[in-house]
Amino acid sequence: MSTVACLGSANTTAWADAAKADSADRAWHAGVNVRSDFGTHPLRVTGGVRWGRIDTSIVVDPIVFSDGEHALDLAGEWLSPKADWGLMFGWRATSIAISSGHQWQQKVLVGVSAALPSLFGGQIRGRLGIEMAILMAKHGGGLPSDFFSLQVGVNERFHTGLFLRFEYASAL
Amino acid sequence: MHRPCSAIAAVVVLAMVAGCDPRPPVLVMCHNSNCTGRLDPSRDDTLDALRESFELVDSGSTLMFDGTELDLVWDSVGRRCLFAHDPPDADADDNTLVGATEATDEVIRLLTLGDLRPHNGDRFYVKFELKVTVDESGGQHTASELTQHADCALDQLATLEQAAVDLGLGFEVIFDSSGPELLNALTANPRWPVNKDAEPARVRLSADFGAPRPLMATRPLGDFPPVDVIEFHPSWLTEGTHQTYRSMGVDLTVWADIVTIEVLRAVEHFEPKFVLTGEVPLVRGWLER
């Protein structure tokens, strides 16, 4: 849908819808997810749909083409009535290219987010969030698998990160 | 009308174009002589794990790693120098304890037996971490024990110097500790080499940092004698501290038991000389993809 929104012909109705999307019961959104920690590449592409107070999103990683590392997020957020705040939960599957294939690192995501002031007259909305990514499993690439354990490297399994999301949104 | 989306698209394209694949030229070290990737800390600093780790070969006789870590504990109860991660329990079976010399000899035996060469092809790195506790209750060294522990470490250096000649292989021996008193005891010892660069076994001094206070009893860098290497876990290093280390001109060691994407990206960012890990096959595979 982001392709349609970005490359399609001018559609003033769609942009007007964007400003109303925050208050709409149902809306789609697409944009970028940026961060400064080492958990993913600094910039990824996100898209999703909001149904009432539940917002779902998928985040993909275009920088995979540069180094073979990809982090795919599937996340949901439970939003406060005005969407000022949200509780986030999700799953991150990270794929790391190695000489013998790919190792996968699976993480649970939990976090909170807050709405930022809108940009471009409400067409672009932002959210700031903090998340904790908890390593649950490592597997693949012909290497030994590892599963969550309190016996091994507990502090190395928990990683926190701050993220910013900028999205175009439009009512469905 | 298209400006917001165009801006987003431009940022994405810029990030993709700017992206690169900066695998740094690091040396890979075997953490606690237990680095096959099967994460089992109960096997740290055991001869069995050491032997299995030395089976990690790329091809022929080239090891996947460039060196190994041997932890040295001064056991105040038994008054002996052990190859171990922690001081033995009071009820430990003496037959299961391994002396420091036995571990050093085993490294030499494994290198000799398989005609093994480090991955860099040039020099094998042995890092002795001198542990700061001397009994199971966490007791610290007395002055006499500091001297004995340093003597034990320098005994290992003498053994490796001879092995370097016998094997025709360069060594670098790194003495590392989180306790500055132990490094001071080493450099104050009359056997401490005058010329640390003398071949065939160069010597280096390393300060070891864990989690910051109050999580751990980490000592400030100012308490340590001048060091050549600083070891840290990437989760605990701020960018300011990293820049301070850089300005000092020291080499860096990143250590990690569990190698996550966060650790690999930290290696790209910090560009250490060494990566000390329990997952050598993963790190080697990542470096060589």
Image (cartoon, helix red, strand yellow):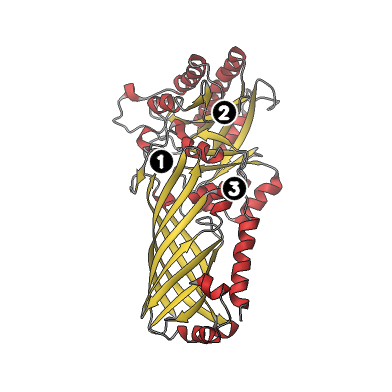
Comparing labels 1 and 2, the label whose residue is closer to the camera: 2
Dots 1 and 2 on the same chain: yes
Side (left or right) of B231 relative to B76: right
Q: Amino acid at mark 1?
A: Gly
* First reached walking from the N terminus: tag 3 or tag 2: 2
Q: Amino acid at mark 3?
A: Glu
* First reached walking from the N terminus: tag 1 or tag 3: 1
| Spatial separation of the CA atoms under disc 3 and disc 2 | 20 Å
Q: In the figure, A49 relative to B113: above or below?
A: below
The chain carrying label 1 is B
Q: Residue at x 43, y 34 (%)?
A: B134
Residue A74 falls in which quadrant of the image?
A: bottom left
Relative image position of residue B131 (x, y in whole percent): 48, 35
User: Is residue A51 in view from this perspective?
Assistant: yes
The chain carrying label 2 is B
The chain carrying label 3 is B
Q: Residue at x 56, y 56 (%)?
A: A63
* Label ID, residue B268: 3
SS for dot 2: loop
**Which residue is disc 1 drawn over?**
B138
Comparing labels 1 and 3, the label whose residue is closer to the camera: 3
**Front residue of this view, candidates B20 and B31:** B20
SS for dot 1: loop
Side (left or right) of A156 relative to B171: left
